[in-house]
Amino acid sequence: MRLERRKNYKPHFFWDSDVAKWMEGAAYVLSKEDRPDIEEKLEWLIDQIEKNQGDDGYFNIYFTVIEPENRFSNRDCHELYCAGHLMEAAVAYYEGCGKDRFLRLMEKYADYIYRVFVEEKSAAFETPGHEEIEIALIRMYRATGRKKYLDLCGHFLNRRGVADNNEEHILKYPRYAQSHLPVREHTEAFGHSVRAAYLYSGMADYAAETGDEAMLNACRAVFDDITKKKMYVTGGIGSTNVGEAFTVPYDLPNGQAYTETCASIGMMFFANRRLEADPVRSSKYADIVELEMYNGAMSGLSLDGISFFYENPLEVYCRDRERHTAMAGEERFPIPCRVMMFWCSCCPPNITRTFSSIEKYFYAYDETENAVYVNQFGSSVYEDGDVKVEQVTDYPHNGKVKITSTVPVYVRVPGWCRKFSADGAYKMVNGYARFEAGEVNVEFEIKPELVKSNVNVVRNIGKAALRRGPVIYCIEGVDHECDINTLAYDRAALKDAKIVPDESIGLDVIELDGARLVDSDPDALYAPLEECYTAAKIRAIPYHAFANRGITDMLVFVSYR
Amino acid sequence: MRLERRKNYKPHFFWDSDVAKWMEGAAYVLSKEDRPDIEEKLEWLIDQIEKNQGDDGYFNIYFTVIEPENRFSNRDCHELYCAGHLMEAAVAYYEGCGKDRFLRLMEKYADYIYRVFVEEKSAAFETPGHEEIEIALIRMYRATGRKKYLDLCGHFLNRRGVADNNEEHILKYPRYAQSHLPVREHTEAFGHSVRAAYLYSGMADYAAETGDEAMLNACRAVFDDITKKKMYVTGGIGSTNVGEAFTVPYDLPNGQAYTETCASIGMMFFANRRLEADPVRSSKYADIVELEMYNGAMSGLSLDGISFFYENPLEVYCRDRERHTAMAGEERFPIPCRVMMFWCSCCPPNITRTFSSIEKYFYAYDETENAVYVNQFGSSVYEDGDVKVEQVTDYPHNGKVKITSTVPVYVRVPGWCRKFSADGAYKMVNGYARFEAGEVNVEFEIKPELVKSNVNVVRNIGKAALRRGPVIYCIEGVDHECDINTLAYDRAALKDAKIVPDESIGLDVIELDGARLVDSDPDALYAPLEECYTAAKIRAIPYHAFANRGITDMLVFVSYR
C-alpha cells in the first residue's frame, strides 16, 4: 500500500518543519560522512531559505506564499513549531560541520520572534500551539551563547497556561495543547502526546540551564505519570487518535493504540533531557531511551528503510477490519503496514534526524567528577580531549560489554536486567555500576522473559509480552497456521526457548514451545468450560520488525499458561 | 438519565408501528383480563384509524399528513412495516377478543397493498425495505382464511433479492436489507438484524403453510449460521451499531455489542416459527426461545417495568467512557442504563406485545399424534377441547416440573441441562422426552456452571460466563469493591456457590468464592510475570437484571482460574 499525493492540493502549513527535520538529519550525516550529494541539497535548501526570508527575519513558506496577511494570527498554525525545527537544523549543521550561514539566518528569525512576542506583543497569541521552539531556543542559546534565546524560551514557558488557556481550540480543551495550567503546576501528562513530550523536553532543558526547581519537579511528576500509568510496554505513548493524545491512567488499548512514532521520539528526547537535567542521574531515564530506541521509535521504520508508521499499534487483528467492511461502518484502525509518506508526514523525517544522531544518547560526561556515564550499549568510542571511553559489544544480541576508559565510568544496569556481573569492582549508584578507569567486562543476563501489565490495564489481564533484554517481541499471523489469538506462551517452556536467525526479516527471533487453545467441539459457539490445549510452536519476532511481510495479524500481549 | 423529546420535531415516519405494537400488546392483555381502561384506549385508536383510512384502504399517518405525495415512493420509509404491525394488532384483537372491526380495516388495507404491489405494480419499489408484513400477512391469512394474503406474502418473498437488489441503499449494501440474493438462496445471516429475523420468521411461516422445502432449507441454514457463529451467549444478535447489523462470524464484542432488544425478540419469533415449521421438531429451537426469554429479550426491560434498553451490551466499563471524555472524542458506546423512551422507540412496545403473549411459546399441539409439546416451563395450563396439559413448577429457580396430561407429552430437555431425571418412562426424540398421558415429575439439574465461547470468539479467550439453568449471570461493579475486571471465577469453588436472595434487585443471586488479581508492586506499570491472587467473594446477578442500580461496570464474560 502506497498513499498517493492528492491532486489540487494546498500544501500543509507545516511542511517547513518536515523539510527542516530532513535538513537536521542531513547535517548529522554530514558531520560523520563525506556526502557531497547530501551537502549540495542541504546548501541548496539554505539558499532558498536565505532568498525567501523576510528583511525582518520572518521565514515561513506557507505564510509567505499562501496567506501573507495571516502571519502569527492563528496559534494552531505551527509557525513557531516550524521555526523551531529550522533552528534545530541550523544548530545541527553549525555544530556538526562548522557551517554558520544557516545559523545566522535563524538567529535573525529568532530575533524577530523575540521582538514580536516579547517586545511588541503583536501576535494574536502568546505561546506556541505546538511546542518545539522551546527545545530549539535552548539549542540556539547553547550554540550562540546569546541569553536572549534562553529568555525567549523562558517567556514561552512562563506564559503557557497563563495566556492562551481559555481559547476554544479545535479540540475544545486547553489541555490538548498543555495550556490548562502554568507549566510548573503540571503533574499529569495531558493532551496531544507529541506536543506534551516536546514541551516537557523544553522544560527539562530550561530547568537544566536555570536550575528552576519548580520546573524540574513538574518534569519529574509528568515523567512518572507517563512511565507509570500511560506508556505502552513498547514505550509508545498516546492512547487515542482523537487529539493524538494521552487519555486516562492505564487506558492502553492494543489494537487502537495511537502511539505515534513522533511521540516515542519525543519521549526519547524527554527521557534523555531528564537524565541530563536532574542533579541525581538515575538510570530510569536512560532505560526509557533504550526502550524507545529498540521498540516504540524503531518500529516506525520498515526493515528496508523506506516506509514508515505514523501509528504503531500493539495488535493487528484483520478480522476486526472485516467486521467494518461487513457493513458500511468506519471504525478507525491504525494502518497495518508502513507506507512511504503520509498526508501529515512528520514521522519519517523525525526518524531520520533521530537515528542519524543516535550517538547523543550513549554517553554523558560528568564534569564535577570527571567521569563518563555509559547510558546505552553498542560498540563505540567516546572521546573528548583526554577523556576516552570505548565499548566493544554485540548488545543486545547478548549482554556482554567490554568497556575501556581513561576516567571512571558509570555503567547503566538496565531496569529489565535481573542478573548483572562484572570482572571488576563496582558500586551501585542510582542504577549505575561505577567502575574506576581501566578495562572491565560486564554482563547483563539476557534471556526471554514474560512481562505482565499492572492489573489496572484490564485489557491485558491474562496476557503477557515477551521481552529479551531491551527488545519487546510480538507474534505475527504469517508465522503461524492458526489464529494467533489462540496461542499461549508456556511459562514452563520459556527456559528452553531458542534464538534462531529468521531470513524473512534478517533478524534473530525466538522459537519456543507453547500451546494452542482448541475446542473439543468446534461446531459449538458456547459450551461448558473446559480448557483444551494442543502443543504449538511459537515464533516471536522483535516488535519493531512487525508488518514487514505483508498484512497479517500481530500481537504483543499474548495469552499464557 | 431520561431522554427528552426534541423541540420542533417532525415525527418518525414509522411511529404507526410503535402505536400498533402497543395495540397488539393491549389486545393480548384484554384477551386475558378485563381492563376497560385499556379497551377504551384501544377502541379510540381504532376509531382514529377508521376515520383516517383512505377510501382506497391506505393508512399511514405520516404519509397521509406530512408527505401525501410520497406514498410508496421510498422503500426505506417503512410503510409496509407499519402496515404489518397494524395487521398483527388487528389479528391479535380479533383472535383474542373476537372483535373484528380493526381486522376489517386491515383487510381493506391489505387488499389495497395487493392491488398496488401485485396487480398495478405502481409503487416505486417491489419489496419492503424493513420486513414485517410477511409475518403479518400469514397471520391475516390464518385469521381470515383469505389465500390472497398468503399469496401477497409469497409475492414479497419471491421478489426479494430479485427486484430491489441493486439500489444504492443509505448503508450502501443490498444485504443490509437482505436483498442481495433470492431468499431461498440465503445461507448466512446478513445486514440489519431485526429485519433479518423478521424476514426469516416470515419465511418459516410461509414454508409451514406451503411446504416450500427450499425456503425451509434457507431458514435452517440461517438459523444455524446465527446460533453457531453470530449470537451472544445471552441470545443477543447484531454485533455492530453500524446498520444495527450482523457482521462476520465470531465477531461478538462485549462492550460494543449492539444486540438490539427487538432483534432478540425477532430471534424468539424465528426460533418459535422454526419449531412450528419444521417437520422434525427439534428442541434446539425452543432452547433459543428460552435463552431469549430469560436473557437477551428480558434484559430490555427494567425491573420496575418502566424503562428500556434498545441495545443490550454484555460489558459496561465506565473507564472506557472516561477515555473519550479525556479528549473531545466520541467513540460510540451503548447507554449504560435503561430509559423511558428513545428517539427510535421500537423496542419498548415490542417488549409489551411479546411478554403479554408469552404463553404462545409454551405449548405446541401435534395433531398427527394427538400429543402436546411442552417447550417452555412455568406453572400453567394448556387446554383445547379434550386436550389438557398442566405444569406445576418453580422453574427456573429449580428444575422440578410436575406435568399432568390427557395426551402424550414431549417435554423439552433443555440444551443446557446435563442431568435429567423423571419418575416415569420416556424415550428421547430430538431433544424431547416423550411421556405417555398421565402424571410425571421431571427434574432438570440446575446448578451454576461456567460457559466458554468458541475459540474463534477471541475476545472471550480466558473468560467464561456463569449460567444457572437457562439464566445467564453477570457481575456488576456495585456489588464489588474492586475493578470487576480483576476478579476471576474459581472453577474449584463453583460447587460451593450459594443461591441467596438479593433485596436490591428482588431476585436470587449467586454468591461464590473467587479470586482477585493483584499486583505485588502496584506502582509498576510493567513487571516480570507473576500471578498474585487474593481471595474475593463474587456476587453474580441474572444478566437481565443488570443496570438497575445506577451506572456501574458490568461483565458477562469474566476471567477464571
Image (tube, coloured by chain):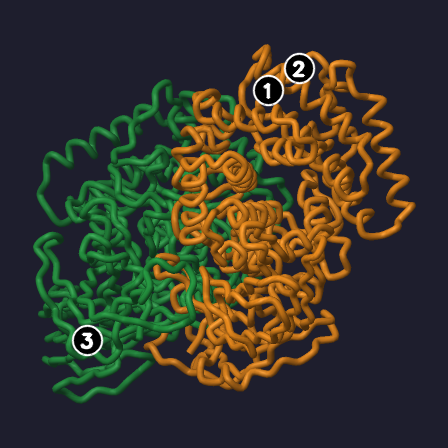
Chain colours: A orange, B green
Using the image, name the chain to which the residue with label 3 belongs: B
What is the spatial separation of the Cα atoms under label 3 and label 2, in whole angstroms? 73 Å
Label 1 packing within 10 angstroms: few (<14), some (14-19), many (20+): some
Left or right placement of residue A136 versus residue B116 in this view: right
Question: Mark 2 — residue?
Answer: A70
Can residue A491 be seen by looking at this rendering?
Answer: yes
Left or right placement of residue B236 versus residue A318 in this view: left
Figure quadrant of residue B102:
top left
Q: Nearer the viewer, residue A205 or B372?
A: A205
Q: Quadrant of the C terminus of chain B?
A: bottom left
Mark 2 is on which residue type?
Asn
Secondary structure beneath label 1? loop
Q: Where does the image place residue B198, in percent across and percent down from the top left? A: 41, 52
| A71 lies above or below A406 | above
Secondary structure beneath label 2? helix
Q: Where does the image place residue B145, in percent across and percent down from the top left? A: 35, 51
Figure quadrant of residue A63:
top right
